[in-house]
Image (cartoon, helix red, strand yellow):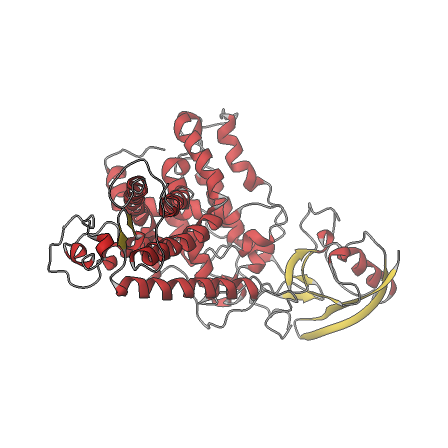
Amino acid sequence: MAAPTTPAPPERPRADIGTKTLRTDAWWRAPAISAFVLTAFVVYATIAVFYNKDYYYAPYISPFYSPCLVAGCHLAAQGYTHARVNVPHLTVLGYWWSISPAILILIFPLGYRLTCYYYRRTYYRSYWLSPPACAVAEPHKRYTGETRFPLILQNVHRYFFYAGLVLNAILTYDAVVAFRTHTGQWGHFGVGTAVLLINATLLWLYSLSCHSCRHIVGGRLKHFSRHPIRFKMWGVVSKLNTRHMQFAWSSLIWVALTDLYVRLVASGTIHGAWV
Amino acid sequence: MAYDLTLRIWRGDASGGGLVDYTVEAEDGEVVLDAVHHVQAQLAGDMAVRWNCKAGKCGSCSAEVNGRPRLMCLARLSTFSRGEPITITPLRTFPVIRDLVTDVSFNYRKAEMVPAFTPTAEQPTAPFRMAQVDVERSQEFRKCIECWLCQDTCHVIRDHDDNKEAFSGPRFFIRYAELDMHPNDALDRKKLVQEDRGLGLCNITKCCTEVCPEKIKITDNGIIPMKERVVDVKYDPVRLFRRRRGGDDV
């Protein structure tokens, strides 16, 4: 290994500029908006998860509760005449799980988004102020980045990516079975069908534009020329990757809107319509 | 059309200094470096400023214009509000020598620490035969003009002098990435860049990419791919298992 050949000179002082930043633009606007939207989502998602009802109106199921892994989901649908059709559930955990089944599901998208390279940039800036914006001094005296626990766990991102693909497949299935009426007749299309379809599409785009996905499909290669198919796949993912930020925000907001729509229909606040 | 422009320039050296106002006549189409030259020619002949090509290719005239790290020769005056002063300060991350000139030798010491290109046994000497698709990938990183704006804006060392020893900085992370992606380079630098060059300190806030005058996607195409490669050799048990069994598909 090469070693430094020039010894570091004694550290001389920097220019004594005084103020923490001389930026004159509204550098605080972007981190403030990001913090507001992320906080709003976290608040909404927390309420939606612990509310633990009105998440199913056949054939629509909220993405927060799909797939349902506990038998209790079936009971949650009781009491609504229009939703007596069984809530689709896998009953992996049986009846003993008494709190919201959404918790079991949301661990994965939450972990995926928390370790996502784009969201990391966003919340480091908006919440940790590390830094709040470029060339704006951060308030912390010490900084160790992602070298120590817990932030070193950001390196597990790719495993959450794999889990996210499984959930995407399930939500795509949910969108396909939404081409039915609530009485189970196929070949119909409602507002909820469109909502679920857009939701699944945005989640796929967010996953496929992921930096880990880009690495896995071809980024780790040294010889693109020896792997022409993976090189092509890498090219497609690289194009999507340039839009990762847009997919991150749009999929986040839409998944909340999807839950809201299902919730409003399931609670009878609005009525689903099919053609 | 000429108009009066006020520049607020940091004057001083290691012992101290402050912002000084200068008003000069500026013309449409000029850049900040032109205005600084007017000040130097007409009002402050002893003002130190480093510059060379005036075309955004030499990377010499790096400074902070209204608080943002920029090349002065690419900062068009027409993009600033007329009537408001433009503040110009030296790069904050590096020790000041005088006025707008800083000591950027930190970067050259980090450059010396990069293990050089090490050809594979397959093609031990030049000329190296490479497919065009393999060449193109690292060409983006070769655009770097070493203006040090990315190093200057990186909060890891800008706000924490104590990290300078352990952190090479974004400019050198793309150098490590370039070598790691080179099909004819045999040396594995992944653990080195993570354990000794401070890649783990980077929290990918993308300021380096924002300030790069060459529009190199430093974070997306250099640092994050390097972080993912480090995961392959340090944190991903499946990849580690495959590597041990000789199944690395590079």
Instruction: Classify B132 as above or below A259.
Output: above
Decide if residue A8 is on the left or right side of residue B228: right
Rendered residue at 80%/66% (across/down): B46
Q: Position of residue B90 (x, y in %)?
A: 67, 64
Instruction: Classify B142 as above or below A271.
Output: above
Rendered residue at 49%/53% (across/down): A4
Is residue A1 visible in the rendered image? The answer is no
Decide if residue A118 is on the left or right side of residue A71: right
Give the number of callouts.
0
Is residue A80 visible in the rendered image? The answer is yes
Decide if residue B206 is on the left or right side of residue B13: left
Instruction: Classify B167 as above or below A162.
Output: below
Where is residue B72, by image quadrant?
Answer: bottom right
Along the line of sight, the residue nearer the viewer: A250 or B240: A250
Where is residue A21, by image quadrant?
Answer: bottom right
Q: Position of residue B69 (x, y in %)?
A: 63, 59
Q: Position of residue A202 (x, y in %)?
A: 41, 45
Decide if residue A18 is on the left or right side of residue A180: right
Q: In the rendered view of the protein, which quadrant contains the N terminus of chain B?
A: bottom right
Along the line of sight, the residue nearer the viewer: B44 or B87: B87
Instruction: Classify A213 as above or below A227.
Output: below
Along the line of sight, the residue nearer the viewer: A145 or A37: A37
Q: In the rendered view of the protein, which quadrant contains the C terminus of chain B?
A: top left
Rendered residue at 46%/73% (across/down): A141
Q: Position of residue A176 (x, y in %)?
A: 31, 39
